[in-house]
Image: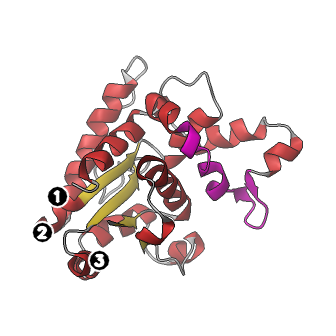
């Protein structure tokens, strides 16, 4: 089965690929990166007049893009749509509930928020393809799914309002030479391709401590080769 990915950025693509490989043993040659296109990076996307989440939503309603992927492969294809919830309150995204509160059940919060975002995306995707989509909806950011690899004390990643900042903090605490492995010195950013490799061995722990990741995995498991 071929697997296509629509995602906000290349870091998200790296995380999704790692999860898919860990769960399904999918070879890289069977993964098609639909958006962002492999020849573009986040800098190119930022120069366009759309935010990354907006590009995801626009891609989901693009019949030409989806048709080119699905129609050639007939029933032997599955699409993963990745989107973060960090900007969910912005105009056009318009997901305002549930609210983050002090004593909230974070797993239940993740379930409710994911369902709201999933419903929005599902209504955008042409009906022909809706049953061929798995939803990688990360609470706040996909960085959250990587946090359990570095934080044994984490109970549920949805508790972090800024997972990217938390992940940077955790990696910043790692000793010298070992820390450099996680940094992309050219882009002066985290090396998500390298960091995501840890998911292969740590997928069980990551799922236990990130309900949104677990829900994506369950969705993927139920639809892959089904």
Camera-nearest residue between 101 and 158: 158
Q: Is residue 124 left or right of residue 32?
A: left
Q: Is residue 137 magenta?
A: no
Question: Can residue 66 be seen?
Answer: yes
Q: Secondary structure at mark 2?
A: helix
Q: Residues within 10 Å of mark 2 (few under 14, many from 20)?
A: few
Instruction: Please provide the residue range marked out in magenta.
Output: 182-202
List the residue tagged with mark 3. 69
Instruction: Indicate which disc residue 128 carries.
Output: 2
How far across and how far down the image is residue 63, in percent?
21, 78
Q: Residues within 10 Å of mark 1 (few under 14, many from 20)?
A: few
Q: Earlier in the sequence, mark 1 or mark 3?
A: 3
Question: Can residue 160 be seen?
Answer: no
Q: Is residue 52 left or right of residue 189?
A: left
List the residue tagged with mark 1. 131
Instruction: Indicate which disc residue 47 carries.
Output: none
Above or below: residue 105 compared with residue 211: above
Q: Is residue 143 left or right of residue 26?
A: right
User: How many numbered circles does the render carry?
Assistant: 3
Above or below: residue 107 compared with residue 79: above
Marks 3 and 2, how far apart at CA: 13 Å
Q: Is residue 187 magenta?
A: yes
How far across and how far down the image is residue 204, in percent?
48, 33
Q: Secondary structure at mark 1?
A: helix
Name the residue: 36% across, 21% down. 105
Instruction: Residue at the far top: name it.
Output: 103
Marks 1 and 2, how far apart at CA: 8 Å
Q: In which quadrant is the C terminus drawn?
A: bottom left
Marks 1 and 3, how far apart at CA: 15 Å
How far across and how far down the image is residue 170, in percent?
70, 36
In which image quadrant can residue 73 be found?
A: bottom left
């Amino acid at each position: 089965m071929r697997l296509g990915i629509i995602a906000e950025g290349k870091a998200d693509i790296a995380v999704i690929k790692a999860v898919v490989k860990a769960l399904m043993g999918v070879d890289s040659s069977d993964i098609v990166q639909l958006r962002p296109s492999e020849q573009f990076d986040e800098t190119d996307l930022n120069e366009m007049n759309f935010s990354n989440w907006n590009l995801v939503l626009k891609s989901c309603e693009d019949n030409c893009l989806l048709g080119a992927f699905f129609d050639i492969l007939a029933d032997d294809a599955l699409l993963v749509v990745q989107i973060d919830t960090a900007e969910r309150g912005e105009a056009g995204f318009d997901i305002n509930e549930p609210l983050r509160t002090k004593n909230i059940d974070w797993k239940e919060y993740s379930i409710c928020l994911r369902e709201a975002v999933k419903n929005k995306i599902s209504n955008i995707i042409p009906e022909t393809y809706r049953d061929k989509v798995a939803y990688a909806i990360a609470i706040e950011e996909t960085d959250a799914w990587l946090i359990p690899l570095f934080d044994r004390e984490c109970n549920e990643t949805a508790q972090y309002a800024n997972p990217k900042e938390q992940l940077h903090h955790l990696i910043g605490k790692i000793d010298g030479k070992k820390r450099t492995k996680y940094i992309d010195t050219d882009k002066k950013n985290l090396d998500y391709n390298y960091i995501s490799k840890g998911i292969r061995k740590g997928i069980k722990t990551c799922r236990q401590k990130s309900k949104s990741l677990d829900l994506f995995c369950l969705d993927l498991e139920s639809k892959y080769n089904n």
